Amino acid sequence: MNFLSRLFGSKKSSHNELDDLPPLYGGDGNSPQNPVIVNCCSVNSKDILINSFLEEKHGVKGTDWQSGFEYFVNEGGVPEYSIRAVTITLADGASRTYYFDISRPMNVAKKLMKPLFDQIEAKQVQKTVEASGTSIVAHMLDPNTGYTRHPMVIGEQIDEETVQKFGEGKNVYIIVAYEKGIPNHIICKREKWEEVKAQHDMIDDAGGSATKRTMDELRKLNSRK
């Protein structure tokens, strides 16, 4: 078994185990730590499922309760754009807030829009780098946010020696791996980064263990250099 096979396992099946689970499952939705998990692949379906949960709890929308404001929870340990807080007002004036894990529909939406966002992001980053003689493009691979590009200032955000060792032109390649919720930034050569990215693209929602293996394997590689 080669390095990448050990890192990510064998090629995933076309069957998604999430499809075997009910549309709504998980917690009671009373806190961000115990959300109702919304199991669908569409943002529109997500809204229908959330409304069905609320109507089962509180009756008919528009009669027994009214929609209030919504927002994404931004707390330590909560992945970005994953937990949606939904506030409603009951007929007696009381307010209730429920929390929903909408990771799956959001991930599908992000994948559909990713090509457009990538083009816009690439142009913005390139303009920033070209306007500065001391900046480079950092190609980031993060299991939470996927592939993104960021301008980095040499001497402030990254040292010159690291750029010379791992950089390629005005580019450096970084893999973000999480250990107990803490991000670890691992800089590597482009060839190895591309291999890891190809495998990352094949990982399904249960990729946390693969991320840890990524960090361990890359640390071993860096220790040999």
Image (tube, rainbow, N blue to C red):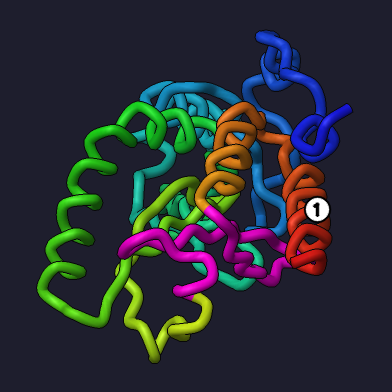
Decide whether residue 192 is among the magenta residues.
no
Q: Based on the displayed image, in which of its 4 quarters is residue 22 positioned?
A: top right
Q: Residue furthest top?
A: 14
> Which quadrant is home to the C terminus?
bottom right
**Crowding near the residue tagged with mark 1, few <14, some 14–19, many ≥20 C-alpha atoms within 10 Å:** some
Residue at 18% x, 47% y: name it. Answer: 120
The furthest residue to the right: 1
The residue tagged 1 is 217
The residue depicted at 66 percent of the width and 55 percent of the height is 30
Q: Is residue 36 visible?
A: yes
Q: How many marks?
A: 1
Q: Given the image, on which type of amino acid does mark 1 rest?
A: Glu
- Residue 121 drawn above or below residue 161: above
Residue at (21% x, 41% y) in the render: 119
Q: Position of residue 188 (x, y in %)?
A: 59, 59
Q: Is 33 left, or right, of 85 in this rendering?
A: right
In reply to whether residue 182 is colored magenta, the answer given is yes
Label 1 element class:
helix
Residue at the spot x=35%, y=53% of the render?
A: 68
Q: Nearer the viewer, residue 109 or 134?
A: 134
Residue 85 seen in this snapshot: no
Residue 209 in percent (x, y) is at: 81, 45
**Going by the image, does 98 lie left or right of 219?**
left
Q: Which part of the image, by quadrant, shows the N terminus?
A: top right
Between 167 and 210, the residue placed more toward the observer is: 167
Q: Which residues are magenta?
A: 163-189
Measured from the top left, where is residue 200 in percent x and y? Answer: 61, 37
Q: Position of residue 17 (x, y in %)?
A: 74, 18
